[in-house]
Amino acid sequence: RGGRRRRSRLPPLSVGDTEQDPRYGHTYDDIDQYLVHYLTYKSVQSVLRGLRASPQTEGDATWLRDFALHSSTSRIQTDSHNFLTELAEQRPDLALQITDRRRKVYKQWRQRYDDLNLYDRMKESNLNIVRYRLTKALDVPMGLEKLAEGYDDVGEAAPESAGQRKGSQ
């Protein structure tokens, strides 16, 4: 109709019986599974880089790349368990390297995001999106938008911003 695009609906979240969020009635098992698949994918990439780095293991790198591209479970990011099971049947040495690397990648990821406080990063991102939309909706000139960034969420001047303004007067 008149060039309007119809929104595609998101697939439903997995509903399980463990760790349910009482407000919404769903679990976060799907997020856990996506994370496992992604960590497996990153681990395969890492092992491939390591194998390619040495002339003695270049043949292993070629074999693993071909396996990852052409196996019956080539969708590492959506079926990592079956991918690794099939790999372990054919090349247990490579499956072991990937599972070991996956564990290390997970530990690195967890340490990094525990340190960076992922919740605060998402909260700041959400605030920036709301600020952007509000600025556009109110058609606030750029100078006023920059001035507003110096205030905290209760409307008082943030300490570092207040000091910067005093010094600039």
Image (cartoon, helix red, strand yellow):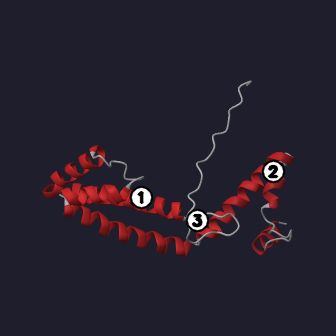
Q: Relative to the observer, which residue lies in front, 138 or 61?
A: 61
**Which residue is under mark 2?**
135
Q: Position of residue 62 (x, y in %)?
A: 21, 49
Q: Earlier in the sequence, mark 2 or mark 3?
A: 3
Question: How many residues crowd around disc 3 within 10 Å: few (fewer than 14), some, or many (20 or more)?
Answer: some
**Which residue is under mark 1?**
37
Q: Residue at x 59, y 68 (%)?
A: 118
Residue 161 position (above or below residue 8): below
CB atoms of marks 1 and 2 within 8 Å: no
Q: How many marks on residues? A: 3
Q: Position of residue 124 (x, y in %)?
A: 68, 64
Circle 2: element type: helix
Q: Residue at x 25, y 57 (%)?
A: 87
Q: CA distance from mark 1 to mark 2?
A: 39 Å
Residue type at mark 3: give it. Answer: Thr
Q: Position of residue 52 (x, y in %)?
A: 23, 54
Residue type at mark 1: give it. Answer: His
